[in-house]
Image (cartoon, rainbow, N blue to C red):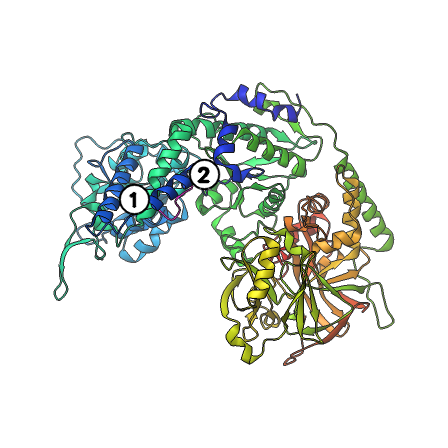
């Protein structure tokens, strides 16, 4: 039985019978989730997806009824108040409790609920007669919980992080007859389910801590309260508060329903509500107060007391429809738990058993169990992929390749540094060193010194299907497994080990690599770039491309002026959608069909496209024209930039072409955007246009030709000519070089009379799959680039011009100019070697900037 046979519906049904909800899941998807057709969405732990019937019924509701502010008393306000109270009751019913036991306080989300609990908890500082409060939390907690220590640190509260093993292994009974003399309040926080690994922690921890039978409560007197972070758990599993009487339970509703977003709740056990202390009052939280005196009486109702201002009542009303849709489709959380756990278990079994042809495992799994019980494991898989030599494949490379297959996953540390450190073996010292190397939370610097900084997470939701599992597993096998793939039968028990049919692709790619290495040995000893001189040499600037409108077609020039931001008018304009958000070819590939032409002599930018009339906009906006060109704020690569709208004619032209409301905007001539991602003074003084990363991108024609050879060796892909591939990489400069990828090891170069600094390698994404002539999408050349570079999908280097002090311009660049490169002194190996690739992926911001892609330009 080979891998493809194992990756079949029949095998899945043999391993798990609880699939679907009594009707064909395909019918449900066709009826409720048509928008995800062709997409494999595996990021449900971040947010699940809403069914279309939910939105329809909600829109019908609010379009037929008048919902007023619930703080008023007119009929529309009473309707709102009664509906909101009905939703509160339905939430408690969902968690098998009643208003007599718990109160629902609406917040903007789980994080806001946690913050509220921390702000109103009665922390006590240590005194001579009484011990101070303890804030204790499981290290496998979301950042939102760990962040409580920022609030408690200046209140004399003891912070005590606790590992999961300490809670489990240090349990003991209270001494018989012991009396709780001390009344100091302490708070213990733990997740019902880890958002990192999907591990479900015992509900018994709640009463064990409250009764001071478990560590750390057993070592400290006082009153112990428990905050149970249920956000991850309740997305796919039931929570019965009769079995788990936690004092505070924060949740986010989009984790369960997908809609509405920006709405959460803090469930407060009424037994614990009396300890909470609130200082601020207003917006309906006061029963009475006097403005001229320090007199205030808080509202009697707990929800009224803690909900500052008017709740987001239309979102609360949407919850009514969310519950209706969820139960109608699935029958309840128990069914969802069985369905999603089966998908996760099956994927875990195959992924953890998959091996390279040499027998090495393909994945390092991060889990505490073996996916044998839905009561101890949620529908989350966390892992890193491993190459055939045992090296970690950076998570950003996996995510880029997954996007090429329209597979949506999550990568990084998932706002759970404690679990990330524990599973990946990252010490506190390493965390600090990673920060010094430029790695911060949320970036895509995935390896530092060859060690992973994070991982890959896939998570399932109630609308996930076996087809999602199959496509994800096939993607891993196709892109990251050294053929022939094998399966470890010891991990699959009943399933036998087998291998997939021989795939000649890898062999042919290796043949190309070998020929390149042989050529390198003949032409050079080691790797020392050959210098050109005034009489000519092997390095030449063959093409110059300007992209006047960001993400639109290229404009080739033989001679072109250079300004302080790079090539004159390069990416000075961009197209935004109706919400003012920049469009790129990732979402709108038809942008490549727009061919801007810059006419310097007539001071106009021409917009051209097939079957469209040509229109023009001025290159320079005169002072008297500013009144008719409104200034607006936009964002490019996280930077806020000042832009100017180019008018209704251009907007109408773009909207007609793209079939959606669009506008053309340009960077304001009075606004300067500085390059601010390095401490190098020569770079920080450089200014940028609307580019993503640096002023220029350069590619080597020899590197293009090598990738073209790799592509021709792969089966089932149409052959692309050299110019087609060059256009997909959307560079400013194309050079003729000696060796493929030698440009990766240059530190500086001179073109004509202008000196450039190499800023690092350009990380590529699925946008290079857009054919710039037609707007169609293919998986090439990203697939071949990943195959050749061992999963590292970088191509081309960023450049920043180094102008003389005070010089506003650098003159003109011409195609055919000779190039003088300078090698990086510290580099000794060829940049396409595994060692050099690892170095390129360290996240050294002076070398790489690795997380951003030029492709979006």
Identify whether 680 is placed above or below 659: below
At horizontal 55% and vertical 23% (from top left) the residue drawn is 12
> Residue 640 lies in magenta, yes or no?
no
The local secondary structure at tag 2 comes to helix
Q: Nearer the viewer, residue 214 or 93?
A: 93
Q: Residue 751: horizontal and vertical position, in percent?
A: 76, 70
Identify whether 306 is placed above or below 214: below
Q: Kindly identify which residue carries mark 1.
A: 266
Where residue 352 is drawn, which disc sits there?
A: none
Identify whether 639 is placed above or below 246: below
Compute the Cα span from label 1 to label 2: 28 Å
Q: Nearer the viewer, residue 407 or 740?
A: 407
Q: Quadrant of residue 357?
A: top right
Give the magenta-colored segment's residue range.
258-267
Q: Quadrant of the C terminus?
A: bottom right
At horizontal 76% and vertical 44% (from top left) the residue drawn is 711
Residue 850 is at least partly visible in this image: no
The local secondary structure at tag 1 comes to strand
Q: Kindly identify which residue carries mark 2.
A: 52
Q: How many residues crowd around disc 2 within 10 Å: few (fewer than 14), some, or many (20 or more)?
A: some
Dot 1 or dot 2: first in sequence order is: 2
Q: Residue 62: horizontal and vertical position, in percent?
A: 34, 45
Q: Nearer the viewer, residue 126 or 359?
A: 359
Kindly indicate whether the residue at mark 2 contacts the one at mark 1 (C-beta within 8 angstroms): no
Q: Is residue 294 left or right of residue 195?
A: left
Q: Residue 602: horizontal and vertical position, in percent?
A: 70, 75
Q: Nearer the viewer, residue 814 or 71?
A: 71
């Amino acid at each position: 039985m080979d891998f493809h046979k194992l990756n079949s519906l029949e095998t899945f049904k043999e391993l798990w019978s609880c699939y679907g909800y009594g009707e064909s899941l395909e019918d449900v998807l066709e009826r409720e989730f048509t928008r995800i057709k062709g997409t494999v969405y595996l990021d449900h732990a971040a947010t699940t997806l809403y069914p279309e019937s939910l939105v329809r019924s909600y829109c019908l509701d609010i379009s037929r009824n008048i919902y007023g502010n619930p703080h008023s008393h007119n009929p529309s306000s009473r309707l709102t108040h009664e509906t909101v109270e009905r939703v509160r009751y339905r939430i408690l019913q969902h968690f098998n409790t009643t208003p007599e036991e718990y109160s629902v306080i609406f917040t903007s989300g789980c994080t806001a609920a946690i913050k509220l609990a921390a702000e109103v908890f009665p922390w006590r500082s240590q005194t001579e007669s009484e011990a101070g409060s303890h804030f204790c939390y499981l290290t496998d907690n979301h950042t939102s919980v760990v962040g409580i220590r920022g609030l408690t640190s200046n209140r004399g509260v003891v912070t005590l992080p606790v590992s999961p093993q300490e809670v489990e292994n240090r349990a003991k009974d209270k001494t018989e007859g012991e009396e709780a003399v001390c009344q100091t309040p302490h708070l213990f926080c733990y997740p019902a389910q880890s958002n990192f690994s999907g591990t479900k922690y015992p509900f018994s921890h709640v009463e064990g801590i409250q009764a001071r039978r478990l560590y750390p409560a057993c070592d400290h007197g006082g009153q112990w309260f428990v905050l149970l972070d249920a956000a991850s758990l309740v997305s796919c599993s039931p929570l019965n508060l009769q079995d788990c009487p936690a004092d505070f339970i924060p949740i986010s509703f989009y984790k369960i329903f997908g809609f509405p977003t920006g709405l959460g709740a803090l469930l407060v056990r009424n037994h614990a509500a009396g300890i909470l202390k609130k200082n601020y009052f207003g917006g309906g939280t006061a029963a009475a107060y006097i403005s001229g005196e320090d007199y205030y009486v808080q509202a009697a109702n707990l929800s009224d007391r803690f909900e500052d201002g008017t709740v987001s009542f239309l979102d609360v009303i949407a919850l009514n429809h969310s519950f209706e849709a969820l139960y109608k489709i699935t029958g309840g959380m128990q069914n969802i738990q069985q369905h999603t756990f089966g998908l996760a278990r099956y994927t875990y079994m195959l992924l953890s058993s998959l091996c390279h042809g040499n027998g090495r495992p393909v994945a390092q799994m991060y889990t505490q169990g073996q996916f044998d019980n839905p009561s101890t494991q949620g529908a989350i898989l966390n892992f890193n992929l491993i190459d055939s030599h045992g090296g970690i494949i950076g998570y950003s490379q996996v995510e880029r390749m997954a996007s090429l297959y329209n597979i949506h996953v999550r990568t990084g540390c998932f706002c759970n540094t404690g679990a990330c450190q524990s599973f990946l073996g990252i010490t506190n010292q390493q965390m600090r060193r990673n920060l010094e190397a430029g790695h911060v939370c949320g970036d895509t610097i995935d390896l530092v010194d060859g060690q992973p900084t994070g991982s890959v997470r896939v998570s399932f939701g109630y609308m996930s299907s076996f087809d999602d599992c199959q496509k994800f597993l096939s993607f891993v096998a196709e892109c990251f497994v050294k053929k022939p793939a094998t399966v470890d039968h010891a991990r699959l028990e009943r399933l036998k080990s087998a291998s997939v049919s021989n795939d000649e692709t890898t062999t042919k790619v290796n043949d190309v690599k070998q020929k390149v290495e042989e050529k390198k040995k003949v032409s050079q000893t080691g790797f020392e770039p050959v210098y050109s001189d005034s009489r000519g040499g092997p390095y030449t600037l063959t093409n110059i491309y300007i992209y006047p409108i960001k993400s639109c077609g290229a404009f080739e020039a033989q001679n072109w002026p250079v300004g302080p931001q790079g090539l004159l008018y390069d990416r000075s304009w961009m197209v935004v959608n109706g919400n003012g958000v920049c469009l790129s070819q990732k979402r709108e590939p038809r942008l490549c069909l727009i061919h801007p032409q810059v006419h310097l002599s007539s001071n106009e930018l021409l917009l051209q496209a097939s079957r469209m009339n040509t229109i023009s906009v001025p290159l320079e906006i005169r002072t008297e024209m500013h009144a008719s060109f409104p200034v607006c704020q936009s964002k490019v690569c996280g930077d806020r930039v000042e832009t100017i709208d180019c008018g209704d004619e251009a907007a109408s032209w773009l909207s007609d072409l793209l079939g959606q409301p669009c506008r053309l905007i340009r960077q304001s001539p009075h606004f300067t955007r500085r390059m601010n991602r390095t401490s190098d003074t020569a770079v920080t003084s450089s200014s940028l246009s609307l580019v993503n990363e640096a002023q220029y991108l350069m590619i080597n024609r020899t590197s293009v030709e090598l990738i073209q050879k790799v592509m021709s060796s792969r089966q089932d892909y149409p052959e692309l000519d050299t110019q087609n591939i060059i256009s997909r990489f959307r560079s400013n400069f194309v050079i003729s070089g000696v060796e493929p990828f030698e440009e990766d090891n240059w530190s500086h170069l001179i073109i004509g009379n202008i000196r450039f600094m190499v800023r690092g390698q350009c990380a590529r994404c699925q946008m290079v799959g857009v054919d710039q002539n037609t707007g169609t999408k293919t998986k090439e050349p990203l697939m071949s680039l990943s195959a050749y570079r061992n999963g590292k999908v970088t191509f081309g280097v960023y450049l920043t011009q180094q102008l003389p002090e005070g010089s506003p311009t650098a003159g003109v660049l011409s195609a055919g100019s000779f190039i003088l490169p300078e090698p990086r002194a510290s580099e000794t190996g060829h940049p396409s070697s595994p060692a050099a690739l690892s170095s390129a992926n360290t996240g050294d911001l002076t070398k790489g900037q690795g997380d951003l892609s030029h492709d979006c330009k």
